[in-house]
């Protein structure tokens, strides 16, 4: 049976695969070890990057494109200063092999 520390490491290794590797700062928030079912129920959180938008580099053709570019540039500057959004997930892990059995949105998220 895995220790809780090993279980958390298994989650840290597997979780990015579910989100295309685009997460960071994975943290253990809660855990509950159930020997009867041979599983660990853990609540973990992680950061997902802020929404990013690309700014066109082609010359502006119309004033509407200019407005759209201005908005995109302003939003891009604003969103790049936001570190990300913290997401909370309830994860069930097999306590023997460390395999993620299920993952759900945490109720209080």
Image (tube, rainbow, N blue to C red):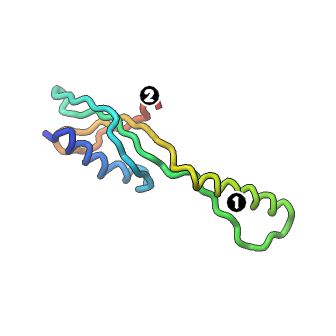
Residue 45 drawn at (x, y percent): 39, 40
Label 1, label 2: how far apart the Cα atoms are = 35 Å
Residue closest to the far left: 1
Residue closest to the far bottom: 59
Residue 29 drawn at (x, y percent): 34, 35
Residue 104, compared with residue 69, is above or below; it is above
Marks 1 and 2 in Cβ contact (< 8 Å): no
Residue drawn at (80%, 69%) of the image: 60
Residue closest to the far right: 63
Which of the two discs, 1 and 2, sits closer to the camera? Answer: 1
Residue drawn at (16%, 40%) of the image: 3
- Answer with left or right where residue 82 lies relative to residue 23: right
* Closer to us: 60 or 25: 25
Residue drawn at (59%, 56%) of the image: 52
Give the labeled residue for mark 1: 73
Mark 1, residues whose alpha carbon is within 10 Å: few (<14), some, or many (≥20)?
some
Which element type, helix, strand or loop, lies under badge 1? helix
- Answer with left or right where residue 81 lies relative to residue 98: right
- Answer with left or right where residue 105 lies relative to residue 9: right
Mark 2, residues whose alpha carbon is within 10 Å: few (<14), some, or many (≥20)?
few
* Closer to us: 20 or 83: 83
Residue drawn at (70%, 67%) of the image: 56
Which element type, helix, strand or loop, lies under badge 2? loop
Residue closest to the far front: 81
Give the labeled residue for mark 2: 107
Residue 81, compared with residue 29, is above or below; it is below
Where on the picture, by quarter, is residue 27? top left
Residue 68 drawn at (x, y percent): 77, 58
Which circle's residue, 1 or 2, is located before the other in the chain? 1
Identify the image quadrant of the N terminus: top left
* Closer to us: 3 or 102: 3
Residue 91 drawn at (x, y percent): 33, 37
């Amino acid at each position: 049976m895995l220790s809780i520390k090993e279980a958390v490491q298994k989650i840290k290794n597997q979780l990015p695969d579910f989100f295309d590797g685009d997460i960071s700062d994975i943290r253990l928030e809660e855990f509950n070890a159930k020997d009867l079912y041979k599983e660990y129920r853990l609540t973990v959180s992680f950061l997902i990057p802020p929404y990013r938008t690309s700014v066109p580099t082609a010359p502006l053709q119309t004033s509407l494109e200019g407005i759209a570019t201005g908005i995109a540039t302003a939003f891009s500057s604003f969103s790049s200063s936001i570190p990300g959004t913290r997401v909370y997930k309830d994860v069930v892990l097999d306590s023997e092999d460390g395999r993620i059995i299920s993952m759900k949105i945490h109720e209080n998220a």
